[in-house]
Image (spheres, helix red, strand yellow):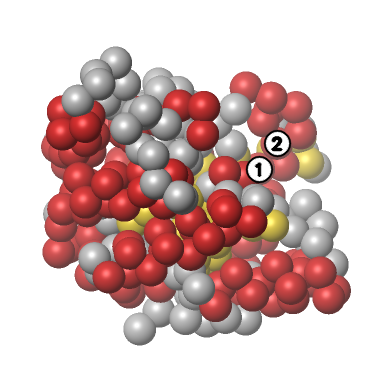
């Protein structure tokens, strides 16, 4: 099965489009996480608390780029796989030639990856050619500075992010390509849905205050898509010193987001 077929099955099984971002900022980990690999220990408890409500997990590579971090990431991916939950590595890779092929090896251990299209199709080909894997291309991001380039007009009638979306749709030879589209600009989400029928990975719902209704209404393609929350879920227990209460709050946050999004599905 392809990634998006697997994702559809997972969405149906748990009745959820929630993507839980696993971004274990070492400075925010609770004091009771004291194992040799604290990021792995933390992630394991997050997965235990949320897997019933998670369509996928999305670890951001930036939080793992050191020797202990890579070990923690490997353990995390294996544990999520054991729970039957796919993993999207948020790595935003994009480079040429041998470098791109090396970056694409990440797909040996995860189900999907985010990539940067700025350098063109040839830099994405090592990812796109893995037909069983998912590729989410950065299109319209949720950060305020995203408009610096993404909103530039191309030709007479399109913004750069719209052009990226259309080109990506043309590159989707293996039906394994989706777009990263932020939830903080719902009118742009709607515009992109009018242009392409690709699944979206929608960050920005949660601590960034994105529009949950728009994320669901325009983010899903034939019922398939993901709405991500990271800090709003994994740090929901901050302020308590009780371990069970902490991860209970994490599970509750994931369930609340699932319920909230399902109101619009």
Q: CA distance from mark 1 to mark 2?
A: 5 Å
User: Could you tell me which residue is drawn at 58 percent across and 37 percent down?
Assistant: 141
Q: Percent from the top left, x then y, of residue 50? A: 22, 47
User: Could you tell me which residue is drawn at 42 percent across and 31 percent down?
Assistant: 29
Front-most of 25 and 173?
A: 25
User: Could you tell me which residue is drawn at 83 percent across and 75 percent down?
Assistant: 98
Q: Is residue 162 visible?
A: no
Number of marks in the image? 2
Question: Around disc 2, counting alpha carbons within 10 Å, would you say few (fewer than 14), some (14 to 19), or many (20 or more)?
Answer: some
Q: Which residue is mark 2?
A: 150
40 is higher (above) or lower (below) than 190: below
User: Could you tell me which residue is drawn at 60 percent across and 27 percent down?
Assistant: 143
Is 87 displayed left or right of 243 in the figure? right
Q: Quadrant of the C terminus?
A: top left
Front-most of 84 and 12?
A: 84
- Residue 161's tag is 1
Q: Is residue 235 visible?
A: yes
- Residue 25's tag is none
Question: Around disc 1, counting alpha carbons within 10 Å, would you say few (fewer than 14), some (14 to 19), or many (20 or more)?
Answer: many
- C-beta proximity under 8 Å, tags 1 and 2: yes
Residue 249 placement: quadrant: top left
Residue 206 placement: quadrant: top left
Q: Percent from the top left, x then y, of residue 44? A: 31, 52
Front-most of 206 and 81?
A: 81
Q: Quadrant of the N terminus?
A: bottom left
Is 149 displayed left or right of 250 in the figure? right
Is 230 displayed left or right of 15 in the figure? right
Q: Percent from the top left, x then y, of residue 36? A: 45, 50
């Amino acid at each position: 099965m392809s990634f998006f077929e697997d994702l559809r099955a997972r969405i149906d099984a748990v009745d959820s489009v929630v993507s839980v971002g696993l971004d274990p900022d070492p400075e925010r980990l609770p004091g009771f996480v004291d194992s040799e690999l604290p990021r792995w220990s933390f992630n394991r408890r997050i997965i235990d608390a949320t897997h019933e409500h998670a369509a996928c997990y999305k670890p951001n590579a930036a939080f793992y780029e050191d020797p202990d971090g890579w070990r923690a990431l490997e353990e995390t991916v294996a544990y999520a796989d054991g729970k039957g939950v796919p993993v999207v590595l948020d790595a935003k890779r994009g480079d040429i030639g041998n470098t791109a092929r090396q970056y694409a090896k990440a797909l040996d251990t995860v189900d999907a990856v985010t990539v940067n299209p700025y350098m063109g199709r040839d830099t994405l080909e090592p990812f796109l050619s893995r037909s069983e894997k998912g590729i989410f291309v950065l299109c319209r991001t949720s950060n305020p500075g995203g408009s610096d380039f993404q909103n530039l007009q191309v030709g007479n009638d399109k913004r750069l992010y719209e052009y990226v979306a259309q080109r990506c749709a043309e590159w989707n030879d293996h039906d394994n390509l989706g777009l990263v589209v932020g939830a903080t600009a719902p009118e742009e989400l709607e515009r992109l849905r009018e242009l392409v029928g690709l699944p979206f990975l929608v960050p920005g719902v949660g601590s960034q205050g994105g529009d949950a209704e728009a994320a669901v209404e325009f983010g899903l393609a034939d019922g398939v898509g993901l709405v991500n929350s990271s800090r709003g879920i994994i740090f929901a227990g901050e302020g308590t010193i009780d371990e069970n209460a902490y991860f209970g709050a994490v599970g509750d946050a994931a369930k609340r987001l699932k319920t909230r999004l399902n109101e619009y599905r």
